Amino acid sequence: MKKQIEYSIGAMLAAIAILLQPSAANAQSQWKWAFNLAPKPVELTMKSPTALFVDEGRGRYYVVESKNNMLLSFEKTGEYLQPFTAEGKLLAPFDMVRDKQGFIWIVEKGRNTLTKISLKTKEVTPNTIEFKGKTVFPDRLEYAGNTLYLLDRASGTILALDNNLTVDRSFDCKDCVEGFVDFKVKDRKVIALNQEQRRIYTFTDDGEEESTIDLDQENLGFPRSFDRDTSGSYYILDRHRGTVSVFNRNGKFSYSFLTHGQAQDQMYYPIELRFDPWGRLCIVDQGNARVQVYSRQ
């Protein structure tokens, strides 16, 4: 009887030890929490951040705060700077970039526009974009090589705009039903994520499809955003599971980290992921109303 009790206790302790160990996936994580982007004073606390723009030249982060209709700026160290409200003229901003001429471009979901803001004159100009006779529903926005790239939420098509905000060329998912949910522009290539097929598409800058990569679907639930690091690995943000899954350049699963929740190293319906120019991984954690910044261990 004594031996049975000792065996049961030993088995129980062994089981607890296994449970307390980090999973194989999390154990492989190369990332540690560095800081959160948080405004001060507390009355400006974020409520619903939706995007992050990183200005490498100025060494700043800009967080799009949708519910408060403002942009919040931070030093690259995470130190809070100031809010920007465009004198109260913003209406449900969703994403933003700043071009080389110093103009700010903002996707406003409240107006369904791509809005241009001059910091010198304070002029705010909402622009409705059309493509093939239909109104575009602006979603994600990128700026590279003096070109604005805009994701149309209605069609899932990525559009490159000329100086007159006319669609110059498009990047289409020809074998998709719902199109793309996120994209990045790197090395004169447009890289896009299709949610339904769990597939990464790469296009040349003239709109020609160059390659596709199928991701290991067993390790993905609801991919919402992504980015690619300098080694070619893909980091996929799972909005529902609150995880980041890492895949190699061929789409093979490597590991995942973070979990669903509201504590540190947890996310609650995150919405965007991107690398900053300083090698850190930034995650817009919408449900927890914060932006988490991670550095490599």
Image: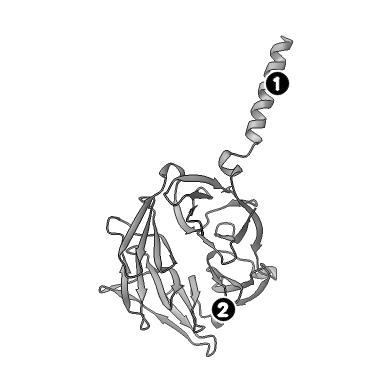
The answer to the question of whether label 2 and label 1 lie on touching residues, with beta carbons closer than 8 A, is no
Q: Is residue 264 above or below residue 169?
A: above
Q: Specify the amino acid type for callout 1.
A: Ile
Q: Would residue 89 appear left or right of 161 to someone viewing this image? A: right
- Measured as percent of width and height from the top left, residue 135 is found at 31, 73
Give the quarter of the figure containing the N terminus: top right
Q: Would residue 70 appear left or right of 194 to someone viewing this image? A: right
- Measured as percent of width and height from the top left, residue 201 is found at 36, 58
- Measured as percent of width and height from the top left, residue 120 is found at 54, 89
Element marked by disc 1? helix
Q: Is residue 260 in view from this perspective?
A: no
As drawn, the residue found furthest toward the bottom would be: 121
The residue identified by callout 2 is: 85
Label located before the other in sequence (2 or 1) = 1
Colour scheme shown: one colour
As drawn, the residue found furthest toward the top would be: 1
| Mark 2 → mark 1, Cα distance in angstroms | 61 Å
Front residue of 101/28: it is: 28
Q: Is residue 117 in view from this perspective?
A: yes
As drawn, the residue found furthest toward the right would be: 2
Q: In this view, does 238 lie above or below 22?
A: below
Query: Which of label 2 and label 1 is nearer to you?
Result: 1
Could you classify mark 1 by the number of other residues whose Cα lies within 10 Å: few (under 14), some (14-19), or many (20 or more)?
A: few
Could you classify mark 2 by the number of other residues whose Cα lies within 10 Å: few (under 14), some (14-19), or many (20 or more)?
A: some
- Measured as percent of width and height from the top left, residue 22 is found at 62, 39
Q: Specify the amino acid type for callout 2.
A: Thr
Instruction: Name the image quarter holding residue 284.
Output: bottom right
Q: Residue 9 carries which label?
A: 1
As drawn, the residue found furthest toward the front would be: 231
Q: Looking at the image, which residue is at 69% across and 12% down?
A: 4
Q: Looking at the image, which residue is at 37% across and 60% down?
A: 202
